[in-house]
Image: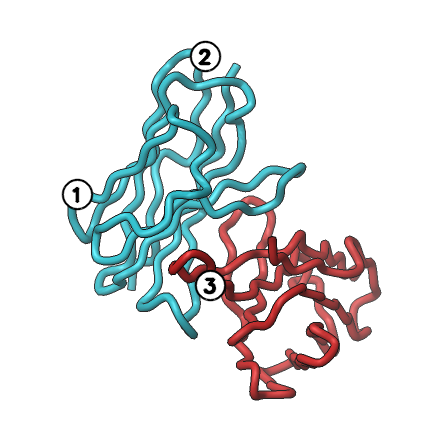
Chain colours: A cyan, B red
Amino acid sequence: DAGVIQSPRHEVTEMGQEVTLRCKPISGHDYLFWYRQTMMRGLELLIYFNNNVPIDDSGMPEDRFSAKMPNASFSTLKIQPSEPRDSAVYFCASSLSQMNQPQHFGDGTRLSIL
Amino acid sequence: SQQGEEDPQALSIQEGENATMNCSYKTSINNLQWYRQNSGRGLVHLILIRSNEREKHSGRLRVTLDTSKKSSSLLITASRAADTASYFCATDASTSGTYKYIFGTGTRLKVLA
């Protein structure tokens, strides 16, 4: 059974460029989460969706960040324009429900903004 | 904001020894989860313990929860080199009508062969 799939695994780009991260959740999972992990701030929840609808985007750092979930099997996290401080590992996770269920994580996208 | 704080930040032990990691949190919870993260990989769920449970086992893992002290511990018995990873606790939080998990800062465990 396939887990959460993220692409690309690594992304290196120059400051000011648009970056798009992709995620395919586990089939049948109703919840999808985007996290950012850095040494300084740990693992931060950016946004989560329930049945493709954004529920809580309070963790999105600023307007440069946007996330969409056009259907149950695909989500994107976009940064435009990118800045060096956006460098981090971005994880996507999915779960069957929000309460009392484990979250299944992808292996992340390591993003470096030069 | 509510966040689990793991203690210690780093732990180095010999293979075969037991490893104990602690997590403290600030506000009431419904449940607490423990996750493992191997280097360069995503987090993997280990165990969930509900607020009305005091102890839970899964293989070589033992988790305790003390809601009066707002703390949990993860014990790995007879550790193996393959247990080398970072371990995180996650506590549930309900704020402004939404419900989510907040992850702690993690304990880096190194098991020496």
Q: What residue sits right under mark 3 in the picture? A: B94
Circle 1: residue type: Pro
Residue at coordinates 43% horizontally, 28% vertically from top-left?
A: A62
Residue A61 in the image: above or below residue A6? above
Q: Is residue B25 left or right of residue B50?
A: right
Q: Mark 1 against mark 2, which lies toward the viewer? A: 1
Residue A108 in the image: above or below residue A102? above
Circle 3: residue type: Ser
Q: Mark 1 against mark 3, which lies toward the viewer? A: 3
In what element is the residue under mark 1?
Answer: strand
Q: What residue sits right under mark 2 in the picture? A: A14
Q: Is residue B53 left or right of residue A71?
A: right
Residue at coordinates 80% horizontally, 59% vertically from top-left?
A: B8
Instruction: State the image coordinates of residue B42 (x, y, percent, origin top left).
Output: 49, 51
Q: Whole-Å distance between the Cαs marked 1 and 2?
A: 28 Å
> Please, which chain is the residue tagged with disc 1 on?
A
In what element is the residue under mark 2?
Answer: loop
Residue A10 in the image: above or below residue A47? above
Residue at coordinates 50% horizontally, 19% vertically from top-left?
A: A113
Q: Are marks 1 and 2 on the same chain?
A: yes
Circle 2: residue type: Glu
**Residues at discs 1 and 3 in contact (Cβ within 8 Å):** no
Instruction: State the image coordinates of residue A27 (x, y, percent, origin top left).
Output: 23, 61
Q: What residue sits right under mark 1 in the picture? A: A70
> Please, which chain is the residue tagged with disc 2 on?
A
> Please, which chain is the residue tagged with disc 3 on?
B
